[in-house]
Amino acid sequence: MSRRLLFLTFAALAAVPGAAAAQPPVRPLVWAADAEGGEPYVFRDPNDPDRHIGSEVELAAALAKELGRPIEFKQYDFKNLFVGLDRGDFDFAMNGLEVTPDRQEKVRFSRPYYVYKLQLVVRAAEEHIRTLADCRAAGVKVGTLEGTAAARLLDRMGIDKVVYDSQVTPYQDLELGRVPAVLMDLPIALYYARGRPALKFTERPVGGKGYYAIAFRRTDESLAAECDAALDRLLKSGDLRRIYCKWGLWNEGQDELTPADSWYEEDDEVTANQPRPREDWTFDRYFPLLARGAWLTVRITLAAMALAVLLGLPVALARLYGPAPLPWLAVAYVEFFRGVPVLLLYLLYYGLPSVGQYLGLGTALELGPLTAAILGLGLNYAAYEAEIYRAGIRSIPPGQWEAAAALGMSPALRFRRVILPQALRLILPPSTGDFVALFKDTSIVSGITLVELSKSYQILSTSGADYAQIAEIGAVTATLYLLMSLPLGYLSRQLEKRWGQDEN
């Protein structure tokens, strides 16, 4: 009997570690947000760029402690957060997400963790604009973020707006005088505008209250309920207030964050009274918006490509035949613009005015968004065109030069009448490819407030359309891009036939 007891004891001791090892590890929850211009919610620590900080970073850490599960951060483009959530790319989204009726129909929101209002900001010297009514009376445009409560309020009041996709750039434009006022959520205004001497708040926040909440898939009700309970405990313990006080976000509005069965009041001005999702995003409604965006895309592309062609040929010739130091300067130009992304236009639009002010030139270096877009894209593509032209010219056999010289032609005449026409036949196909690529690269100009075709689609896709309508609008957008590029291919083929280059 004692042996049997001893055997069972050893068996039990041996089984305990094995049982513990057999337990599957706890899967971390994945939280998605956009750290680009994400202050004060989530952004990179200037002292340690590998680390993220912010009010929502600390809130996620507090939630992880309450839930007993690690939470990992995932960088995700803000405009695609709800799409990514539906795809299952992460478990929840938390990024200063405003609770609106159209979003509530697509996701399951947690109980709110912050109550916000809207704040109008103007330049410090502004004396005439004190309210949104003043903006409407003066007929001025107000800067704001796309797809937000502020944008919808401006639409509801009939006030023209300038739409941005970054929290930083509207206040930069306000300082530079490009927009007379900016309307955004109060937490954003507190972080970006309060410390700028050139800006000031109007007298008080605008409109009613709205809520920030965590977005979950509708099928993740269990996880959402756990987070609701965890947020409730953080509120009762004072941890939520401690986080907001640390980041300067606590105000009397947060006193409304009391435990309750229902947090989204039906008569709330910022949330419940927002326009309901439109069920009639028919072709005749959205196509004019896309067509205007397509027309701007065509204008930018044609002007930028014309600039690229005009600059590309002289750069190629300087590299091939120019006296020193022109070849070195041409190489430097090509390597610089090939190595710098098209985002250079941000420097032209936002950087040059700051340089001008620093040098005491006032607004001499200030460029409009359309000019900056054309100049930035044109300078960039000129480097690629220069290399195409150089390769085409060098491919012409030296005997062609010699034959033309034997006929008594001058060097300039030889190049214009003999070399360049032959080189153009070789240059045409790759230049056409660049032209088509430029149509698509124009999408980057939306970062400097231009609403071209892709930006028009993004705005429409966040304006209450359902998934089927978003797919339809996306298909029409892709068709417009195709219709813009097909004529170029056709023209290229016709020219190749005319010049005897079509071997088919």
Image: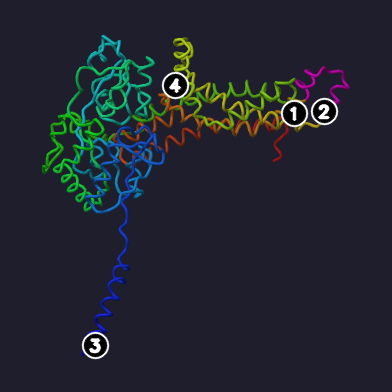
Tell me where residue 447 appears, x and y as whole percent. Answer: 42, 27
Q: Amino acid at mark 4?
A: Tyr
| SS of the residue under disc 2 | helix
- Identity of the residue drawn at 21% across and 90% down: 1
Q: CA distance from mark 2 to mark 4?
A: 49 Å
Residue named by callout 4 = 350
Pick the residue in front: 93 or 134. Answer: 93
Let me know if residue 413 is in the magenta part.
yes
Earlier in the chain: of badge 4 and badge 3, it is 3
Mark 1 against mark 3, which lies toward the viewer?
A: 3
| SS of the residue under disc 4 | helix
Earlier in the chain: of badge 2 and badge 4, it is 4
Dots 2, 1 in contact, CB < 8 A: yes
Instruction: Judge the density around disc 2: few (<14), some (14-19), many (≥20) Cα neighbours within 10 Å.
Output: some
Earlier in the chain: of badge 1 and badge 3, it is 3
Residue named by callout 1 = 422
Pick the residue in front: 145 or 492. Answer: 145
Tell me where residue 183 appears, x and y as whole percent. Answer: 28, 23
Residue named by callout 3 = 4
Q: Is residue 27 left or right of residue 203?
A: right
As displayed, is residue 263 above or below residue 488? below
Earlier in the chain: of badge 2 and badge 1, it is 2
Mark 3 against mark 2, which lies toward the viewer?
A: 3
Q: CA distance from mark 4 to mark 1?
A: 42 Å
Q: CA distance from mark 1 to mark 3?
A: 99 Å
Q: Amino acid at mark 2?
A: Gln
